[in-house]
Every structure is written in C-alpha cells, then in structure tokens.
Image (cartoon, rainbow, N blue to C red):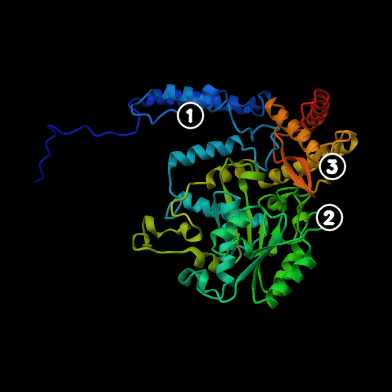
Amino acid sequence: MLKAAGTAGMVAEETLDPVDWADVQALSHRIVDDAVDYLRDVRERPVWKDMPAEVREFFAAPLPRSPQPLAQVYGEVTDKVMVYPMGNIHPRFWSWYMGSSNFTGALGDFLAAIQGSNLGGGNHAAALMDSQVVDWCKQMMGFPQSASGTLVSGGSMANIIGLTVARNTKAGIDVREHGVAAIEKPLRFYGSDQLHSCHRKAMEALGLGNNALRRIPTDAGLRIDIEALRAAITEDRAAGFKPACIIGNAGTVNTGAIDNLQALAKLAHEEDVWFHVDGCIGALIAVAPENAHRVAGIEWADSVALDPHKWLHAPFEVGCALVRDASAHRKTFAVTPEYLESTPRGLASGHWLHDYGLQTSRGFRALKVWMALKEHGIEKFGRLIDQNIAQGHYLGTLIEAEPLLELVAPPSINIVCFRYRGDGLTGERQKALNTEIMLRLQEDGIAALSDTTVHGQHCLRVAINNHRTRRDDLDLLVRETVRLGQEILKSGAAR
C-alpha cells in the first residue's frame, strides 16, 4: 500500500490561474464591454495619431520581475496601446492592402486562445475545423475537393508554400534529399514587373536566388505581357535553363491590375510549367457576383495564395495556400519523426496538418474565419467585395472631376493612384507636395494613405479594402486633399 508523501519542507506549487476567478470574471466582462465600445465608436476617433515621448518611453521599461494586479495591467494596455493603433480597422484607413477585422472574428481569436489547441494536427475538433476552412477556401476558388491546402500566417508565406511545391515538382530531382545544387538545369520562374516583393524573398529562401525570377514587362494596364512571357520562356530554354513556374497576379499591390489568368493557364499547360497565382490582393473576387469574371482562370491554377485577413476581414493573421496536387503538396513538406507517428486510435490518430507547411506548431487560425463565415455567409462577403470595387471606381470619378487632382492610373479594382497637380510643379517638387499632403492627412487623423510609383510617376495610393468605408468618406478625402494641397502651396511648406 502506497504511503502519502510527506509535505513538510516542500515548496508550494504554483500556477498561472488566478487566485480569485470572480475578480477575473468581472474584469473580463469590463474588457468585452470596452471592446464593443471600441469598435462601435471607431469612426469617431482619429485614423492614426503619433505617440508622445512618454508613451514611447513606457515601451523601453525593463523586464518585470514581480507581479502587479491584472486590472492595473489592463489599464496600461488601455492607455498605452489601444489609443495608438495602426488604424486599419478605421473606415478611412487605405494605406496598405489590409482587411479591417470584425468583432465575431475577434471573439473567435479569443476562444481559440482559450481552447489553446496546437494545430500541428491530431484527433481533435480544432484540427477538423482547420481542414474545413481550407475546404471552404477551395470551394471559393473553384478548386476540386481532392486538392490540398493549409492555413498560414499570411500572403507571403502562402506564396512561399506554393512556390516551394512548384520548385520540388519541376526540379527533376529529389530536392529535399540532394538540395538545389544538384538540379541539372537552373530553374526559372516568371512573373510581371509588378510582382510583390515576397516573391523575391521566396526565391532567396528556396536557394534559387533573385536571378531565377525573371520579371516580364507589363502592358499599359500593368498586366503581364503574354507574348513577352512566351518569348522569355523560349529564350531561357534555348540557353539551357529549365522554365519551372509562371506566377500570375490576381491583383497587383500597386494598382490592383489582374493578369489574364486564363491565358497564363493555357501557356503554362503548353510549356509544361507550374502555374501559381498570387491572389493575396484579389483572389477572393471569385466570390463577388458582379466582379468574379475578373479572375476567371484562377480555378485552373496549380497553386493559389489568398488572404482571409484581407477581403474576409479576419483579424490578423491568417493566409491560405491551396495546391491542386495534394500528393505533391504533402511530399514537399512531410516528415514523420518517431515522436509524431500516427496511432490507430486516440489523440495521434488524426490528420497531421504540419505535413503541409513549414510549421510544426500552428495556431488555431480557423475559428475566427469559420465563425464570421457562419454568421454572415459567403454571399455577404461577395457583396462587400463588389462594394469596395464600386467605391474605388467612385473615387476615380471624383478625382477626374476635380481639376486640382489627376489619376496616375485608371482604377482596375479597388486601388486608386492619384496625385495633386500643383500648377507648374514637376518631379521632386511635386513628389514633396504630395508626400506632405499624405503625412498631414495621417497626422491630422483624417485618413491614412500610402504612396508609390506607377509608370515612373510618384503618386498617392488609396487601397479600399474595408467593410466600414462609405462613399462620404471618399468625398471627405477628396475635399481634404484639395484643401491641404492649397494650404501647403500657399505656405510654401512643400520643400
């Protein structure tokens, strides 16, 4: 018979659970109430505001050694974090192409953290939901049920997943065993000169190098030139390279231009190369009833990268990589160490989701997407996409009607590139004026824009990827841009 171990002299065991659950419950109710107020009143706050010196100094404090009450910790979050956001949930945040989140998704993130499941795999409900959300993404893109996919951190990683499968499939050798140095003919990947920078990072991470990615010129609408692409493939093959992958843009980051995906799919088939679509900007247009035709052909891709944290407005972060050939996808990443072998029953009898990407430990990203889709239905998200595209074209008409402003490129979807003319100003002086307008719009909390270069011309860029934006927000933007431009020119502040 076992004897109870003596407790004399033993150190008390500790836990991170609260001593008083009632106090935590009361504070949690307050936090949820504050969160509802925060989103309800978002339109009444500045889009963005700079942090004063004392707030910046707060974040330089050293590592805490001793405890402090949770209510005090929350007070610091309220005072030092919540009032200084990036601003992307605000209806007049258009700086970069980001979704604007939603409350249901935030609840999903909270519940996912409470449940605490690791989505590396296994036999549990969160893993099944992860696979279900991937299946739903396949349905959105018109992919077959037999296709594969994985949820990842965002578009950059989703693209890396697709391009890694492309490299391994087209290398002609076992890259995982022998490495890229053993590839007989150097691989070539192709995309337009408007590709997102993540593709360069992918080439570098894949050991192929930036020179393996050949940038193809674009037409007047900034879409890839199909004939120039065809000629580049022929030229590279004759020079001893192996064309491996064509990357199509379903919306470029600069202007939202969409390549002719049907033509690219046809060319990829003719040339026996992988067809990958970077759909992080516009793949989800496929669910928009008025605009789905713009991405026709995406359903023929070998792989697609898309971002639920953009036009599905899931809280950051969640991206998705889809791969038509499930076997090729798994063969690219799967490793089965002895401590992760499957069992016929029990926890380890489930699907190992880490076999489809680089992460073994994976967060429960699916719940926030799942809950919002269940609440609203995909048809509403499609209508919201149509709404943003209509707003982009509406802003374009406002700019064309204003003599002091000019479009640098006609809106393709929901990204608008324009500038303040500034009579007689050109080059760096005009750039300085528009940059100052952009900074004052931000600093005054009116609107958040970014800037870029299109057709060699500096311009302001408005990316309307926001379910809270209304047309009167765009009216305000135009009025304030004109006002600030006139004010800056009058004061001579644009240097």
The answer to whether 421 is drawn above or below residue 208 in the figure is above
**Of the residues under marks 3 and 2, which one precedes in the sequence?**
2
Front residue of this view, candidates 156 and 239 = 239
Q: Is residue 214 left or right of residue 183?
A: right
Amino acid type of the residue tagged 3 in the rendering:
Leu
Amino acid type of the residue tagged 1 in the rendering:
Phe
The answer to whether 108 is drawn above or below residue 42 in the figure is below
Identify the residue at image location x=61%, y=27%.
Answer: 50
Identify the residue at image location x=81%, y=58%.
Answer: 219
Q: Are marks 1 and 2 in contact (CB under 8 Å)?
A: no
Q: Position of residue 447 (x, y in %)?
A: 72, 31
The answer to whether 9 is drawn above or below residue 257 in the figure is above
Q: Is residue 82 left or right of residue 272?
A: left
Residue 477, visible in the rendered structure: yes
**SS at mark 1 in the image:** loop
Q: Position of residue 153 (x, y in %)?
A: 54, 49
| Residue assigned mark 1 | 59
**Of the residues under marks 1 and 3, which one precedes in the sequence?**
1
Front residue of this view, candidates 221 and 374 = 221
Count of numbered badges drawn on the protein: 3
Residue 321, visible in the rendered structure: no
Front residue of this view, candidates 315 and 492 = 492
| Residue assigned mark 2 | 220
Per the rendering, the mark at residue 454 is none
The answer to whether 133 is drawn above or below residue 98 in the figure is below
**Of the residues under marks 1 and 2, which one precedes in the sequence?**
1
**SS at mark 3 in the image:** strand
- Residue 402 image-quadrant placement: top right
Separation (CA) of disc 1 from disc 2: 47 Å
| Residue assigned mark 3 | 407
